Amino acid sequence: MQVFLASIPLQNARVVVVGSGEPALAKLRLFLSSPAELSWFTPDGPPPENEQSRGGPTPIVRGPVAEDFCNARLVFIAIEDEVEAARLASLARSAGALVNVVDKPALADFQTPAFVDRDSVVIGIATGGSAPILARDIRSKIEAIIPAATGPLARLAGDIRDTVKASVPDFLARRRFWERAFRGHAADLVAAGKPLEARREMLRLLNAAAPETGVVHIVGAGPGDPELLTLKALRILQDADVVIYDRLVPEAVLERARRDARRLYVGKSRGDHSVPQDQIEALMIAEARAGQRVVRLKGGDPFVFGRGGEELEAMRKAGVPVFVVPGVTAALACAASAGIPLTHRDHAQSVTFVTAQEKPGGIAPDWTRLAAANQTLAIYMGTDRAGQTAASLISAGRAPATPVAIVENGSRPDERVITGTLGDLGGMVARSNLTGPALLFVGECAAFSAAELDVRAEVAA
């Protein structure tokens, strides 16, 4: 986070604006509908009357002196003379005010964000002063989706807040009440301009408020790019009380969760199970029985080598309500991001997802079937045994010259694609110093990766 947006109360606040041009007028307009006391100084003379905002303060046609900044909370200086602007900023700071000097960020304590103003609800978009036009464009998009009734709805919530707190002492039940209030019929009534009916509906909901039974959502986080989260996964993350996540879930995805949700890390890697599977399942059950909305967040898709089936079975046996939200599985996302088609009319009529890490004491893969031609293998958890896997496939009939690709951190900004042949797969892994999650792709389609095509272009040149 490069900048911090603070929420500054404007009740009983004094705001001072210095300047007579359009930048100063723009700052004045921000506060015309607020409860702040406005003072406006125009040292270069007042603007024409037809440019002055209705309901705005009468301009004071002189430069401010130190006493004029007394009790000011915010000061906006919009004049061209940089020396004079710096002097006035110093006077304002000495009086205890926060200062914004328009178009001179080096002299300012803060930049003015682009605002979406819904009365009691204000949304700010800030770029640290580096891209104000971009901030305005983002504001326009948000404006289009935030109903005008959002402000009145927030005011109504403020009116009954103490009543709700006294009537529903349980924190989780209280939050559930507000969610029903903001997302249900009461919100529709506010939007229809019927505040009294909306208030009655909220009070009716209040009488029915009670602690709720917990629930578990087993959610696929996708391959790591937060934009590949499904809309359903995003909505459930933003409603979660507890997020139990594994090592394949990056911070960029966790940031999409509700900010005050508890995060519990239960990551596992080969030979290092920080929390055994049975303890993870016990934790999910305990949190749900405590009334929490639990999200078990798993990299990729929970039902593709993610042990989601085991966790689903455990929740059902415990009588815990459980739902599964599929995610974009890593094989699909990594292949697409690297430019590898998993099937191709000329080269691969099927694709097989396989793990190189079978359960201890379990059945070994059928290498003869996996070595068949005209298919693509997407191998999960295969880097530790890449050499063995390649040897098994070659022994079963796959040609050593078969194209292969390693995709590390697929779909993420630090994605890396390494290409070669099956006979050298073990050496490729050893030389590549892989540190992130990686998938192996074996088959003629691996030659379509962008990295491989770049190599061919260099050879041809």
Image (cartoon, grey):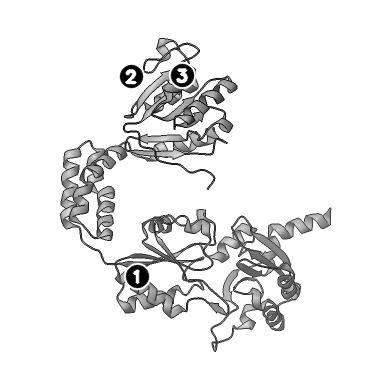
Question: Alpha-carbon distance for marks 3 and 1?
Answer: 60 Å
| Residue 131 found in image quarter | top right
Helix, strand or loop status at disc 3: loop
Could you tell whether 15 is left or right of 330 in the image?
A: left
Q: Earlier in the sequence, mark 1 or mark 2?
A: 2
Locate residue 412, reporting x and y percent: 59, 57
Badge 3: residue crowd in 10 Å (few <14, some 14–19, many ≥20): many
- At x 23%, y 41%, the residue is 156
Which residue lies under the disc numbered 2?
55
Which residue lies under the disc numbered 3?
64
| Residue 39 found in image quarter | top left
Locate residue 277, reporting x and y percent: 46, 78
Q: Earlier in the sequence, mark 2 or mark 3?
A: 2
Q: What is the residue that sits farthest to the bottom in this orientation?
A: 361
Q: Residue 210 versus residue 58: which sits nearer the camera?
A: 58
Q: Is residue 372 visible from the viewing direction of this image?
A: no
Question: Alpha-carbon distance for marks 1 and 2?
Answer: 55 Å
Disc 2 to disc 3: CB gap under 8 Å: no
> Which amino acid, mark 1?
Glu
**Residue 287 image label:** 1
- At x 51%, y 62%, the residue is 222
**Residue 11 image label:** none
Question: Alpha-carbon distance for marks 2 and 3?
Answer: 22 Å
Helix, strand or loop status at disc 2: loop
Locate residue 129, reporting x and y percent: 55, 35
> Which amino acid, mark 2?
Gly
